[in-house]
Image: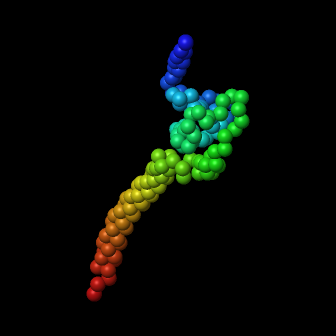
């Protein structure tokens, strides 16, 4: 009687993103050798892509035990929640809270910058009005003195 022990080596999880022409290929292989690939354009955030792959793989592993995972020579396994994930993650700002928060912060920065510029512009206008007011005051005093001299020579 001979027994055979199979030692399965687990590799560390691997995440990688590779640029190919106009696309990015995001890959994640877990320690249990379950892996996923997401192909997106360059504008799609890398962190969001890996978050999506991780969520899909976690749900897949929770739904199907490892002995039901297809091998290279087997067919596909039905995974009905995948289309819902893909639809949700079409807009990374809506699917990912951190990306949405970053976009909100960027918008707030733009609004704040415009507000500061408007306040500074208003301040310059106020300075111009103060100068004009001082000039008008000087001119009115000069007019008053001239009018007083003119009126003093005509008094009876």
Residue found at the far front of this picture: 1
Residue 103 position, x and y percent, is 50, 49
Residue under the image location 54 percent in, 52 percent down: 94
Residue toward you, 54 or 104 = 54
Say if 83 sits above or below 14 in the image. Answer: below
- Please give the count of numbered marks on the rendered protein: 0
Q: Is there any visible trace of residue 122 in the rendered image?
A: yes
Q: Is there any visible trace of residue 24 in the rendered image?
A: no
Say if 52 sits above or below 126 in the image. Answer: above
Res 149 → quadrant? bottom left
Residue 95 position, x and y percent, is 54, 50
Coloration of the structure image: rainbow
Residue under the image location 52 percent in, 41 percent down: 62
Residue under the image location 48 percent in, 52 percent down: 104
Residue toward you, 71 or 25 = 71
Residue 74 position, x and y percent, is 70, 32
Residue under the image location 32 percent in, 82 percent down: 154
Q: Quadrant of the C terminus?
A: bottom left
Q: Quadrant of the N terminus?
A: top right
Residue toward you, 38 or 156 = 38
Residue toward you, 21 or 68 = 68
Residue found at the far bottom of this picture: 156
Res 145 → quadrant? bottom left
In the displayed structure, does residue 36 sit left or right of residue 115? right
Residue 60 position, x and y percent, is 57, 41
In the displayed structure, does residue 88 sit left or right of residue 22? left
In the displayed structure, does residue 103 sit left or right of residue 128? right
């Amino acid at each position: 009687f001979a027994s055979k022990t199979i030692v399965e080596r687990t590799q560390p999880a691997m995440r990688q993103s590779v640029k190919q022409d106009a696309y990015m290929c995001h890959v994640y292989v877990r320690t249990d050798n379950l892996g996923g690939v997401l192909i997106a354009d360059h504008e799609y955030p890398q962190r969001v892509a890996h978050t999506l792959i991780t969520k899909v793989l976690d749900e897949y592993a929770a739904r199907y035990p490892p002995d039901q995972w297809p091998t290279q020579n087997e067919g596909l396994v039905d995974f009905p929640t995948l289309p819902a994930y893909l639809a949700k993650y079409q807009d990374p700002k809506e699917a990912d809270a951190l990306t949405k928060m970053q976009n909100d912060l960027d918008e707030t920065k733009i609004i704040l910058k415009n507000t500061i510029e408007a306040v500074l512009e208003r301040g310059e206008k106020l300075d111009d009005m103060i100068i004009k007011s001082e000039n008008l005051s000087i001119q009115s005093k000069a007019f008053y003195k001239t009018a007083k001299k003119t009126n003093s020579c005509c008094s009876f």
